Image (tube, coloured by chain):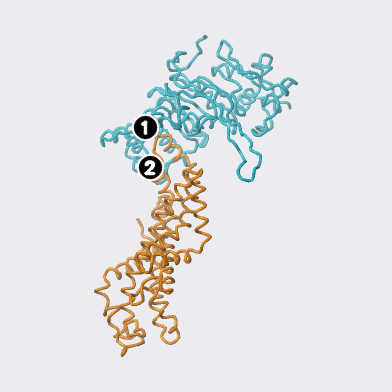
Amino acid sequence: MHEPKVRSGEGRPDDVILSVEDLAVHFPLGGGLLGRERRLLRAVDGVDLTLKRGECLGLVGESGSGKSTVALSILGLLKPTRGRIVVDGQVVTDGPSGDRKALARTVQIVFQDPYASLNPRQTVRRTLEDPLRVHGVTAKSEIEDRVASMLRHVGLRPEQADRYPHEFSGGQRQRIGIARALILNPKIVICDEPVSALDVSIRAQIINLLLELKETLSLSYIMISHDLGVVEHMSDKVAVMYLGRIVENGDWREIFERPAHPYTQALIAAIPDPLRHAPLATTGGDLPNPLNPPNGCAFSPRCRYAEDVCRSEPGPVLETRPDGHAVRCWRADEIAGQMVLAPT
Amino acid sequence: MKLRANLVIGGALFALAILVGLLAPWLAHTDPVLDANLMNAEEPPSWTWWFGTDGQGRDIYSRVVYGARISLTVGIVSQLINSVIGVALGLSAGYFGGWWDDVVNALTNLMLAIPSLIFALAIMAVLGPGLTSLLIALGLTNWSFTCRIARASALSLRSQGYVQAATVLGYGDVRIMITQLLPNMLGPLIVIGTLGMGSAVLSEAALSFLGLGVRPPFPSWGSMLSEARDQITTAPWLSVFPGLAIFLTVLGLNLLGDGLRDILDPQSRSRRT
């Protein structure tokens, strides 16, 4: 197999730290006593992902595309309908709840909203000390040292530990959220839109902090975002999700320079670029109702290239090409890399 | 930190009521039960009889002072039982959901459908009159509002990022409920708790009036009020003073609850000081 280009980390092909195989999460809706029709919401429907040690995998897509559902499944918060998730050798999807504590020491998450993600009634110290105690660290000096050093890692002063979350700014709160995610020394961190709730002026700080921590603490990231600008800056690999499925998957350079799926092209066209004179053609419309997905390819109602085959046949299987680039589109070979200008 | 008026006044009133109850033997002029003298019956308030005397010539002041013991014990203990039951059921129902939530909901609806005083009456009828059965009866019948509030708060807090984070960090369910959910729902629970104490004092009066609460010679504010019902036009001091005691205690409890909520909410704390 062709070794993909990576920006950082070891990235040996066999060094997979997380793999998601054929993950599906379906939510039954309705039903109950009144005997209404039971319907199935296919939030995630057959997703395969691999994350290599030291890499950052960007997971992009609109709201409702299933990105966060994938994240919650990896964290063991949602029970998948089907599929297998292996995190650093541990099969998450086995058994009723598995070994939650072992999983906690391997995967952690940084949440989007730094205001809702910190307990307003706990000091920062308590927020960072409790996880250590839960995981059996009892020595008072060790707990204090680890909290202090983690605060320094994320750019806060240890003497700020006795304050409450509301005494901090949004950016500082997100630093606390990052510290909490890292306090157990996890190997994988899922960043769920870590900067989209923040001021534009401090986004770059947080992104740079995340990149720096990835190197110093040798972490692997899954970067969930609908903002391709952030993903482009951070990711080694990119997977694009649409309506519960991955439509394009590959090396970041491939995805950004030669996007093959019309949806990916539309997302890239939507990145604001002050140097571009003519706006690129994006796509209109909304994500279709996942309870009533369109016939054929799920993107066909919004796709400028849609043909009869797209409207009648479901999208093709995601086939990985030798260069690691995979696309789920009938016309991918014709339209790969084309960026169309917006009609005036 | 600046002290607020509601906290100071409420705390002072409640502390006063508790002090009066604790120091009753030293504060009272006469024995509230034994020192009856028909020669002094229905004396209006004076320097000798501060709050007047009742139909048996007992000193109302001494009876109000001793009454604090029973009324406050019933108010505090029965509401504590209610709070513990309500929070345990509501918090776990909101957190776990599923069949347990259905069971708790059904129980709560049942409790709300039956008038709590009637239910308490039924329990009293089974257990027989007396202070202990009063505590049990009132403690088992007024948890539904606490339960509702705890459940609603748990439901809305459960999806908060910090609760999810705690789960991801490997916290156990009990730890999450106690450290993440409970502290964030204290405000409304304290308000409900103080109001509940007030209504427990009133329920105690109703049950005592029906002969199922505290037995007649022993004074509680509620039973004194009930006994004074017939003489409200001829000897108003019989009802005014125990009524005033109830009023001031309930007022104190409500102000205190308000003040405590301000303190326990760290966001409003730094905003106001």
Q: Colour in which chain A is shown?
A: cyan
Q: Residue at x 45, y 60 (%)?
A: B142
What is the number of the mark on residue A285? none
Q: Quadrant of residue B127?
A: bottom left
Do marks 2 and 1 share a chain?
no
Of circles 2 and 1, the one toward us is 2
Which residue is labeled 1 in the image? A183
Q: Position of residue A141 (x, y in %)?
A: 25, 35
Q: Residues within 10 Å of mark 2 (few under 14, many from 20)?
A: some
Depth check, front residue: A132 or A175: A132
Q: Position of residue A216 (x, y in %)?
A: 38, 23
Looking at the image, which residue sits at the far left? Answer: B26
Amino acid type indicated by mark 1: Ile
User: Quick one: SS at disc 1?
Assistant: loop
Quarter of the picture containing the N terminus of chain B is bottom left
Q: Is residue B252 left or right of residue A244?
A: left
Residue A18, compared with residue B112, is above or below; it is above
Q: Colour in which chain B is shown?
A: orange
Quarter of the picture containing the C terminus of chain B is bottom left
Depth check, front residue: A197 or A327: A327
Q: Residues within 10 Å of mark 1 (few under 14, many from 20)?
A: many
User: Quick one: SS at disc 2?
Assistant: helix
Which residue is labeled 2 in the image? B175
Q: Position of residue B96 (x, y in %)?
A: 47, 43
Query: What's the chain of the residue with tag 2?
Result: B
Query: What's the chain of the residue with tag 1?
Result: A
Residue A105, compared with residue B119, is above or below; it is above
Q: Residue at x 54, y 19 (%)?
A: A252
Q: Quadrant of residue B68?
A: bottom left
Depth check, front residue: A206 or B126: B126
Evaluate whether residue B211 shows in this view.
yes
Q: CA distance from mark 2 to mark 1?
A: 18 Å
